[in-house]
Image (cartoon, rainbow, N blue to C red):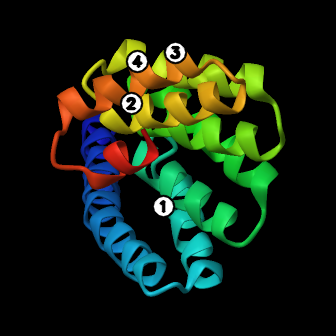
Amino acid sequence: MKITIWCLFVLFLFGFEGISHAQKTPSLLSQADSLFQRGNYTQAIPLFTKLILLEPKNEKAFRGRGLANIKLGNLAAGKSDFQQAIFLNPACTNCYLTLAQLAAQSSNLKETETLINKAIQIDPKNENAYLMRAELREAQKDYAGSLRDFDQAIVLKPNIPESYIER
């Protein structure tokens, strides 16, 4: 009888703990996102971190903290968070594109191309990926490849002026 009561008590506690986390996390994410949107990246990072501690598989929290770190110039921390986000969600196209931008900033064109190609493989209708690859190919003096990628971006989203301007 004591074991049954103890088990119920433990379940009761863990049940409320789960509800407590479930109630905290949307609020934390909302607060962190709000701070991020206002440009308060330094203040947003601890909230994203707290959310990650509560929910270690929260991809959005890793992406948010990663972007905040990148905005503050903490590129290594940002890269690490985006790598973790990809680990949690291998289909995160924007995660690959963000990592591609970081690779391009460090002049690692091979890694940039690999990451962009992975994004296109996951989402072949992502015009931003084609635009990024077109610019990369132009930098590599692959003008025919660049033109094909600009054309593909235009086919996908004909209303985006930069596709025409850059072409």
Report the residue at 67% width, 28% height from top. Answer: 112
Q: Verify CB contact (< 8 Å) between mark 3 and mark 1.
A: no
Q: For the residue labelled by badge 2, is the local secondary structure a helix, a strand or a loop?
A: helix
Q: Which mark is residue 144?
A: 3
Report the residue at 28% width, 44% height from top. Answer: 11
The three-letter code of the residue at mark 2 reads Phe
Work out whether 142 lies above or below 139: above
Give the residue number, with chain letter if any, for mark 4.
148
Q: Which mark is residue 4?
A: none
Separation of marks 3 and 4 at Cα, in angstroms:
6 Å
Q: Is residue 83 left or right of residue 13?
A: right
Callout in the foreground (3, 1) = 3
The three-letter code of the residue at mark 1 reads Leu
Q: Nearer the viewer, residue 16 or 108?
A: 108
Work out whether 1 lies above or below 5: above
Give the residue number, with chain letter if any, for mark 1.
51
Q: For the residue labelled by badge 1, is the local secondary structure a helix, a strand or a loop?
A: helix
Image x and y of residue 106, in percent? 83, 43
